[in-house]
Amino acid sequence: MAPTPVPGRPKLVLASASPRRLALLQQAGIEPDTLVPAEIDETPFPRESPRKLALRLAREKAAEAARRLRDDPDWSGSVIISADTVVCVGRRILPKAETVEEAAACIRLLSGRAHRVYTGLCRVDQAGRVSTKLVETRVRFKRLSGAEIDAYLGSGEWRGKAGGYAIQGIAGAFVLSLVGSYTNVVGLPLAEAVGLIGATGYPVTLGWIAKG
């Protein structure tokens, strides 16, 4: 159920269907007024870097959400926030695993080595102005045994996840070290996302403070 509108504040649109991104915003006391999943082609361009891909897809998601809402007067002047997360080893971009073969290739590549997670953020404000931000986190996995990899693949937790894993799930036990934002690896760098939203004048209220 959509939250009750607050007079005087813009509506907030999350251009994503990700339950993880929604939960992270809710964790910070921010409840989007609606979700507008943007179905776009996420195929990287030839020789496109992971950084550029994350930012481009975030912009495209926000633009698609704006396009879908522009003829609806109820959503005029809304704030739109979108994100896209890319996992890479060097310049090699790992897929959002949809088959066990893709997941196996990702996890075997990540085993025992470091990788980077980039999330591109895009915010469209009430006047249609676009702002973007890129957040990077470095993650290192322990070396995984064949039995560990097989057990993980059998869990199915990898499905639809960038790089074939979700750090907040079973694969969190694979992480030896992390430098940067943990919530970035989950899918939404929370400090940066809240900052972008709050810069529009949207009343950001941290839920844990309100409850204290």
Image (cartoon, helix red, strand yellow):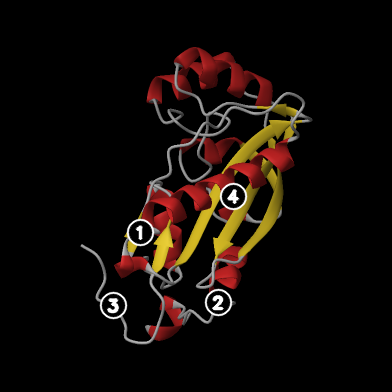
- Where is residue 41 shown, x and y percent of the image? 52, 31
Nearest the viewer among 45 and 97 is: 45
Residue designated by label 1: 71
In the picture, the quarter occupied by the C terminus is bottom left
Looking at the rendered structure, the secondary structure element under dot 4 is: helix
Give the mark nearest the N terminus, 4 or 2.
Answer: 4
Image quadrant holding the N terminus, namely: bottom left
Q: Residue furthest left?
A: 1
Dot 1 alpha-carbon crowd within 10 angstroms: few under 14, some 14 to 19, many 20 or more: few
Q: Is residue 23 left or right of residue 87?
A: left
Label 2: which secondary element:
loop
- Residue 59: mark: 4
Determine whether 175 is above or below 112 in the image: below
Q: Quadrant of residue 181?
A: bottom right
Residue at image mark 2: 200
Callout 2, which amino acid?
Answer: Thr
